[in-house]
Image (tube, rainbow, N blue to C red):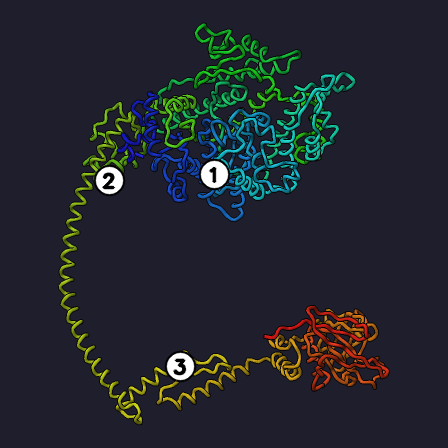
Amino acid sequence: MEGALIARDRVGVQDFVLLDSHTSESAFLDNLRKRYRENLIYTYIGTLLVSVNPYKELDIYTVKQMEQYKGVNFFELPPHIYAIADNAYRVMCTEYNNHFILISGESGAGKTEASKKILQYFAVTCPTTEQLQVVRDRLLLSNPVLEAFGNAKTLCNDNSSRFGKYMDIQFDFKGAPVGGHILSYLIEKSRVVHQNPGERNFHIFYQLLEGGEEELLRGLGLERDPQKYIYLIQGSCAKVSSINDRSDWRMVRKAFTVIDFAEKDIQNLFGIIASVLHLGNIQFEEDSNGHAIITNGAQIKWISKLLGVHLSILQEALTHRKIEARFEEVLSPLNVDLAYYARDAVAKAIYGRMFTWLVNKINGSLANKDLTRKTVIGLLDIYGFEVFETNSFEQFCINYCNEKLQQLLIEMTLKAEQEEYKLEGIEWEPVPYFNNKIICDLVEEKHKGIISILDEECLRPGEATDLSFLEKLEEKVGHHAHFLTRKLAKQKTRKSIGWVDFRLLHYAGEVTYCTVGFLEKNNDLLYRNLKEVLCKSKNGIIRECFHLSELDSRRRPETVATQFKNSLASLIEILMSKEPSYIRCIKPNEDKKPDKFDDSLIRHQVKYLGLMEHLRVRRAGFAYRRKYEHFLQRYKSLCPETWPHWRGSAARGVEKLIKHLGYKPDEYKMGKTKIFIRFPRTLFATEDAFEYRKHLLISRVQAKYKGCLGKREFQKKKQAAIKLEARWRGVLARKAAQKRAWAVQTIRKYIVGFINRKQPLNPANVDYVRLTRCTYLMKLRDHLPKTVLDQTWLPPPEILQETSELLKKLCRRTLVRKYCRSITAERKAQMQQKVVASAIFLGKKEGYDDSVAKPFVDTRISEEDLNPKVLQLIRHEKIKYVVSVVKFDRNGFKPRERLLVLTRVAAYLVEMAKIKQKVEYTMIKGLSTSSLSDGILVVHISEECKQQKGDAILQCEHVFETATKLCMLASKEDIAIAQGSLLYSLGAGKESTIIFTTAHESRIYKAKSGQLTVVSPKVKKS
C-alpha cells in the first residue's frame, strides 16, 4: 500500500485514514473522486472497504486476480473486495473463529454484486472435492433464485433487493465450504400488489411470462403479454432493456435442478405465482345492496384450480368476512373497497409466505448433515439508509435496522482498536463519538418506544387510525430530543413537516416519515375465512405455509414491526458473536452512467453510511501502524546504520531509522511488535524520501552493474569471434574442395556407365546398372498392385525386363495366396452358393444382377424364433435355413403366411406351431420360377408322393437365396426359368398355368380365366 502513496496527488490515497484533513468531508469526497476517475473503485477506512459502483465492466475480477489476493497480507495489495474476503477466510482458518461481512448501501450501490463476488472468490480459491462441488454450486445458484423471487426493478436500481439477506457459509476444518444457511428479513410484500411509476413487480413474474414454455403457460392459464395483468403494469415498464428475462428464466430453471427441487414443488411454486397474477385481475362491482360481487368468473376458476381450493368457498371468502360472536359465526358481506383489500391481502400473504418457504427449501439443500464443528463466514446484504420524498413504514424499519448496525459498527470498531492498543502496550485515549443508543431506544424501548406505541395502537379496541397513532406518539415521546412533529416543531421547521408526519433525528441526519399506512402495514391482517380457505389448499406449498394450528390459536399474531425488531435483535446477537468485516457501497449517480460522479448524491450517502464518523473513530489514535519487520525492510535504505544489512532486532533497527529520519516524540509510538505513526504527513514524508533514495540507489547500482557486464561481455565476444572466424573459414574451404572432387568423380563414373549400359555387366557400367536397379525397385515398391484384380505393373527399364517379369509373377502368386488364406469357411460356402446361383439365374431372371453384391445369409430366422413345438417335431433333423414365405392355395390362390424350414432331408411349411406340409427332397421333381422380378418359386412334387396334393406355389422376398439353398439341399442341378407362363400340377393328374406379366405396379391375383396371374413391375435396363 505504501508504494501507491507516490501517485497520491493523481489517484488519491488507498486508505482514508491517511488523509491529512480526515475531518473534512470535502477532502474525503475529493479522494473518492480521484480514485473513481482512475477506475479505482475500492478504498479502505482501516479495514472497512468503501466501494463505488462503476456501472461498467472492469477487468479486476478474473481468476488471476483471485489467485493474486489469495493468502496475501491485507495491506500488501491495493484495496479490493477479494482482500476483505481473503482476510476473513484466512483469519477464520488460522484462529478457527467465525466471521461476518456486512455489506450495506443504497439501492443500486452494488450490494448484491458485492456479495456475488465474495461467493465467487470462495468458490474458486477454497479447496474442494467432487462432493463439495455440489455444495459450492448450490451456494452460487441460490442467488439467481432469491433474486428472481426477491428482487425487482426500482427507480434507483434495475436489480434491487427488496429483502434483507444474511447467509452463513459453513467451512470444515480444511477450509472447504460444506454448507450454508440463509436468513431473510422484511420482504417488501406490498410490491406484489402495487408499484410506483417506473418500477416493476418481482422479476419472477416477468421471467415466467417471457421464458416459460407454451405448455407450462397453458397449464397455468397465463398469456405471454404482461400488459394483461394488473399487478404487472402499474409501473408502466414491464420491459426493461438491461434485463433479459428469458435468459434469467433459464438460469432459475437450472438452479432449481442443481438445488434439488422436486418437480412437484416446482409446479406448485409456479401455480402460486400464476395465482397471484390471476388474483390481480379479479374485478368487483356493487350489487343492488352495495355489496361486492365478482364481475368475471374466469380468473377465480383458475385460482381455484391452481391453489386446489373449492371455487364457491373461495368466491365467498373474497366477498365476505367471517365475524365471530360469542356462540356463532356470522358472514358479513364486504363492500367493493374491502373486497379489493381482501384480494390484495391474500396476494401479499401467499407470496410472502411462499418466499419464506423458498428460503427454507434452499436451506434444506445447503444443510450439512455432518455434526462436527464448523466455522462460518456470514454475508449480510442489507438495505442501506433510505431517505425519499415520502418515507413510509418500510423506510422506518430499514432506517431502524441501519441505526442498530451503525451502533454495532462503532462499538466493534472501538473494541478492535482498544484490543490492538492493549496488545501493543500503548495507552488508550478515549474517543468522543455520537452514541446512537438514544435513537435505538426511542424506536425499540419496551412499552415506551415507537414500535411499542404502534403495536398498542394496532391492538387496542375501537377505531384506531394513523392520526390517532401520531397523537399517541406526541403524547408518549414528544419530549424526546430526537423526535419532532408539526405540532411540536418550532415556527421555522413547522412548514417542512406535514400534518400526518413525524421526524426522527437519526445518526445520519433527519428523516420525515408519513404515518399514512403505518397501522395497515404493521397489522398485515388476513381475514380468518381467507386463512381457512388457504389452510385447506391442495397445493403442497400453501398447505405448508398456512397451518391449521393458526386457526385454533386465539392469540393475535405478532405485528410486522415486532417481528422485524425480534429478527433484528437475533441478527445483532449473531453478529456480536463473530469477527466483523465491513463493505460500504456507494452509488455515484442516479442515471446509472459510468464515469459520472455526482457530488451532492455521494455526500448524502457518505453522511447516511456514517463513513465520516467511522473515519473519525479510526483516526482518533494513530493513522498508520506496521510490524517492525515490514517497516524496517521497506525503509532501511534511508539510514546508513541499517543499510544494507541490519544485524540486530527489528525494533532496535526501527529506533535507529526513525531517529535518523528525525521523527518527533508526538509523531509516533513504539509498541511491542508494531510502530504507530500518528500523522499521515509523517508517513508521506518518509515514503517520498524512500522514493527519492530508491531512484538514487537503483541508478547507481544499474550504472555500475551495466558497465561491468558490458565490458566483460564485449571482451568475451571479441576473443570468441576471432577464433571462430579463423577455424570456420578453414573448415568451409576444406569441405568445398572435397565436395568438388567427389562430384567430378561421380559424374564421370555415371556418364561412362550410361554409355556402356547395354553391354554385359563390367566395372565400367556396374555403378550405373546398380543405380538403375535400385531406382526401379524403389519406385516399384510404391506402385505394387494392392489386390488380385489390379493388373497394373510399373514398366521396367530395358536391362530389367526379365527381372520385372519374375517379380510380377511372384507378386501375383503372393496376392493370390494371401487372398485364398483370407477366405473363411463361411465365406467359401457363400461363394459356392453364389456360383450355383450364377449358373442358374445369370442372364435368365430379372433382378439377379442387383442381388449379386448382397451376400447370402445362413438363415433369415433363427432357431430361437421358431415355435418350440415345431422344433420338437423336427428335433432329429438339423435345420439349415428358415425364411418367411407366402404360400398360395391351389383353389382360389388365397395367400397364406408360412415359414419355409429347410433341413438336411426335407422342406417344411410351418404355420405358428403347426407343420402344414412336409416335402422330402427325394420327392421334389424340380423347381421353377419366372424370368421376371417377382418372387414366385414353384416346387414341383413327384406324383408318386400320395400325401402331397400338387405342386407348392411360394412367394419369397429372397427368392435367389431361397431357390439356391433349396436347389443345393435337394441336389437339383438346375431350376426351370419360365417365360410368360408356367405349368404346374394341381394333383390327381390335373394341371394349371401361372401367367407372368409386367405393369407399373406389382400384384398377384386370380384372373377371370381362373388362372393365377403374377404382375411384376417393369425394370429399366441400364
* Residue 782 seen: yes
Determine the residue located farthest toward the bottom in the rendered image.
760
Residue nearest the viewer, comparing 263 with 13:
263
Q: Is residue 541 above or below residue 919?
A: above
Kindly identify the amino acid type of the residue bearing the numbered disc 2.
Arg
Residue 1018: image quadrant is bottom right
Q: Secondary structure at mark 2?
A: loop
Q: Quadrant of the C terminus?
A: bottom right
Q: Is residue 404 left or right of residue 973?
A: left
Structural distance between the alpha carbons of marks 2 and 1: 45 Å
Comparing marks 3 and 1, which lies closer to the viewer? 3
* Residue 875 seen: no
Kindly identify the amino acid type of the residue bearing the numbered disc 3.
Leu
Estimate how packed mark 1 is, as few (under 14), some (14 to 19) or many (20 or more) residues with alpha carbons within 10 Å.
Answer: some
Q: Quadrant of the N terminus?
A: top left
Residue nearest the viewer, comparing 712 with 338:
338
Q: Decide which of tag 3 and tag 2 comes sooner along the chain.
A: 2
Residue for badge 3: 780
Residue 271 in the image, given as x and y percentages of width and height: 65, 36
Comparing marks 3 and 2, which lies closer to the viewer? 3
Residue for badge 1: 119
Q: Decide which of tag 3 and tag 1 comes sooner along the chain.
A: 1
Q: Are marks 2 and 1 in contact (CB under 8 Å)?
A: no
Q: Is residue 713 above or below residue 37?
A: below
Q: Secondary structure at mark 3?
A: helix
Comparing marks 2 and 1, which lies closer to the viewer? 1
Residue occupying image coordinates x 68% and y 71%: 1017
Residue 414: image quadrant is top left
Residue 898 in the image, given as x and y percentages of width and height: 77, 71
Residue occupying image coordinates x 26% and y 26%: 681
Kindly identify the amino acid type of the residue bearing the numbered disc 1.
Leu
Residue 826 in the image, given as x and y percentages of width and height: 62, 79
